[in-house]
């Protein structure tokens, strides 16, 4: 088994880091942490001077002693916009990496990136060059921007964006290989603070840099027509945008209800500011992706947003926020009238749930890992689906972690019962010892590690087994399978397997947080149809006492096994009723009666 340190990718991220301020800096730093936690060797190459002052009418840096997010090391800060020699020196060192990620925000940095690419020494193999595009084109484009972006895409291997719309734009500018992954949360401000009791019209907050495309002046103009709600505008003004908002705040009918808090809001003041408001206003005229809706939900605020960018995916309309069309003043006035009602505000805030801060990062890192592993440009998504990939030739990936069946302890079995937290801890320790990327929670890791054991011990054939994984981004299974040399095809949970009969080797559905017995008949039918003879179905279901809702007891489980057997699926590892015995043992040792039995990982082989 190859040690993890020699199998990990060497990754260079070229982008802003502390003391450069803002969301992109926080995202770059958190990405470095996430990649390192996944087992990769990471370095951040940042800027001492990122761009000339006329491009950013405000303070570029924050206080050196108060970073907005935990710092990442190693980070160098040798790049400067006015020192082309710093670009060339950085480029000469990039040949030592497997993956180079160029953080793209403004086109004015592209000449520096192109100089770095030109300076990369020749040799085999060259690093994979990926553009991480927060905005393919700026919100307020300048002449020549498209030409610069096209030149960057022509010199790099792939582009990662945050929305399907941005993916289409990237392809229109010449990018051949494009992957879209939702912007993962990189939330500043720490944990929520205690709120003072309040029951009144909505207290709205517009947070962040004040720029024309954010539509804050539109919001203030609408507010002048609706008595009751108040608004705080907190952030630096960009150019004339601050004056535009100030003029709107002087309109008749809005006096005294708009507070303008000029200047950058430090991270350590965010939680207190959010606690003084009820609704975060994101009335953007245009947008790509933003984490502000997630920031609001983390702190218990509802969201008022326009239907642009990623907001329709982040806000559940009429549940934890309200969505309106962009630039629709009439609709904005109507929504503000609703927010004047304290009961509406309370109802929306009651619908707010804590956002998932881990699953999106697992999916995001997996997208970068996939781009690093690709040997050829991906086909156009509009014409080639995952079903085409299933029907085409399947080859293994170059393994980053060498793991064989005999590297796994004997107690990791294809079929098992998780009854104790310590058993999940033991599985996590094994995964780390093997050098597998750090993903998901302990229970997900326990389920995924047993899935790998099943594939390696029962179905491994030179890492060319065709695996279709429906486990979702919370499960580490697909990431681990890629790390050891398989090439799983990831499919959304519950999507019909519209594939040729008998065409796949392994079907996995490992998602413990959502695991309930449900109706397994459709799953068994799909598996029998899709699997080759000898193929594996690996899944999880929730188990518990007979009186617990939504779970299965011992007698129920035997019925499921009989149902699967009738469908032509034979359980792997249930000799003489061993599974039922393990269920009862889990119940007898469980300290929490409500957790008795826990989770079952079941592996079937198609006859």
Image (cartoon, grey):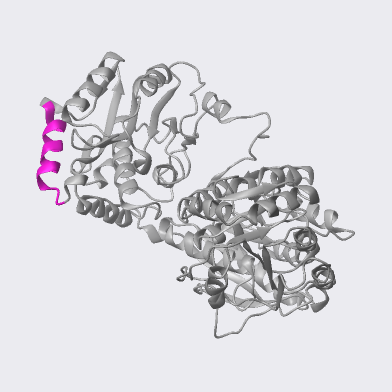
**Observer-nearest of 464 and 323:** 323
Work out whether residue 165 can be spotted.
Answer: yes
Please provide the residue range marked out in magenta: 577-591
Q: Is residue 52 magenta?
A: no
Q: Is residue 520 above or below residue 112?
A: above
Residue 503 spot, x, y in % from top left: 45, 20
Residue lying farthest to the right in this orientation: 143
**Picture quadrant where residue 296 is located:** bottom right
Quarter holding residue 449: top left
User: In the image, is residue 587 part of the stretch drawn in magenta?
Assistant: yes
Q: Nearer the viewer, residue 362 or 275?
A: 275
Q: Residue at x 77, y 71 (%)?
A: 255
Q: Is residue 379 positioned above or below 64 on the image?
A: above
Q: How many marks?
A: 0
Q: Where does the C terminus fall, quadrant-wise?
A: top left
Placement of 598 over or under 139, stated as above or below: above
Tell me: 503 left or right of 429: right
- In percent of width and height, residue 406 lies at 24, 43
Point out residue 169 in the picture as x, y percentages from the top left corner: 76, 45
Q: Which of 386/260 is in front?
A: 260
**Rendering quarter of residue 117:** bottom right
Residue sitting nearer the eye, 122 or 361 = 361
Q: Report the side of 61 relative to 199 (left or right).
A: right
Q: Is residue 593 left or right of residue 61?
A: left
Q: Majority secondary structure of the magenta segment? A: helix
User: Which residue is located at x 75 percent, y 78 percent?
Assistant: 58
The reply, left or right, for residue 374 in relation to residue 479 is: right
Residue 48: x, y in percent?
A: 67, 79
Is residue 129 visible in the rendered image? The answer is: no
């Amino acid at each position: 088994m190859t040690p993890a340190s020699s199998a990990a990718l060497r990754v260079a991220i070229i982008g802003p880091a502390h003391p450069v301020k803002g969301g992109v800096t926080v995202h770059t730093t958190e990405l470095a942490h996430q990649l390192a936690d996944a087992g990769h060797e990471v370095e951040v190459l940042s800027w001492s001077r990122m761009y000339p002052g006329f491009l950013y009418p405000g303070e570029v840096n924050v206080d050196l002693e108060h970073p907005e997010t935990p710092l990442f090391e190693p980070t160098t800060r040798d790049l400067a916009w006015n020192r082309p020699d710093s670009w060339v020196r950085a480029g000469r060192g990039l040949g030592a990496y497997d993956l180079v990620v160029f953080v793209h925000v403004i086109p004015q940095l592209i000449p520096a990136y192109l100089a770095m690419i030109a300076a990369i020494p020749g040799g085999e193999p060259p690093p994979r060059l990926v553009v991480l595009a927060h905005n393919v084109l700026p919100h307020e484009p300048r002449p020549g921007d498209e030409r610069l972006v096209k030149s960057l895409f022509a010199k790099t291997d792939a582009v990662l964006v945050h929305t399907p719309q941005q993916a289409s734009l990237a392809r229109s500018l010449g990018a051949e290989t494009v992957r879209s992954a939702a912007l993962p949360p990189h939330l500043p401000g720490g944990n929520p603070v205690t709120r003072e009791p309040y029951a009144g019209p909505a207290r709205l907050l517009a947070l962040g840099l004040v720029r024309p495309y954010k539509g804050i002046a539109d919001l203030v103009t609408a507010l002048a027509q609706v008595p009751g709600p108040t608004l705080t505008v907190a952030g630096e003004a960009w150019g004339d945008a601050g004056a535009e908002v100030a003029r709107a705040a002087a309109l008749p009918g809005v006096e005294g209800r708009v507070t303008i808090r000029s200047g950058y809001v430090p991270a350590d003041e965010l939680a207190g500011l959010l606690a003084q408001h009820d609704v975060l206003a994101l009335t953007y005229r245009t947008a790509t992706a933003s984490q502000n809706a997630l920031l609001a939900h983390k702190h218990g605020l509802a969201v008022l947003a326009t239907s642009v960018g990623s907001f329709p995916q982040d806000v559940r309309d009429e549940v934890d926020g309200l969505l309106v069309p962009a630039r629709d003043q009439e609709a904005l006035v109507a929504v503000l009238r609703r927010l004047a009602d304290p009961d509406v505000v309370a109802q929306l805030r009651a619908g707010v749930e804590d956002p998932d801060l881990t699953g999106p990062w697992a999916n995001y890192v997996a997208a970068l890992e996939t781009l690093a592993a690709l040997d050829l440009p991906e086909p156009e998504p509009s014409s080639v689906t995952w079903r085409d990939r299933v029907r085409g030739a399947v080859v293994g990936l170059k393994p980053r972690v060498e793991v064989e069946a005999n590297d796994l302890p004997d107690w990791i079995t294809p079929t098992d019962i998780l009854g104790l937290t310590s058993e999940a801890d033991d599985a996590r320790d094994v995964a780390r010892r093997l050098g597998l990327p750090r993903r998901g929670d302990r229970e997900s890791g326990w389920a995924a590690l047993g899935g790998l054991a099943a594939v390696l011990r029962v179905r491994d054939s030179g890492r060319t087994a065709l695996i279709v994984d429906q486990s979702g981004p919370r499960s580490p299974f697909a990431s681990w399978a890629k790390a050891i040399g398989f090439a799983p095809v990831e499919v959304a949970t519950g999507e019909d397997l519209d594939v040729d009969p008998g065409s796949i080797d392994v079907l996995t559905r490992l998602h413990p947080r959502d695991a309930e017995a449900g109706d397994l008949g459709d799953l068994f039918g799909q598996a029998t149809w899709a699997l080759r003879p000898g193929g594996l179905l690996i899944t999880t279901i929730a188990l518990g006492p007979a009186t617990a809702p939504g779970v299965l007891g011992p007698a129920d489980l035997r019925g499921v096994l009989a149902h699967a057997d009738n469908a032509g699926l034979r359980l792997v590892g249930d000799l003489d009723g061993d599974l039922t015995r393990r269920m009862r043992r889990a119940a007898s040792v469980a300290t929490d009666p409500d957790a008795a039995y826990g989770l079952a990982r079941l592996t079937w082989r198609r006859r």
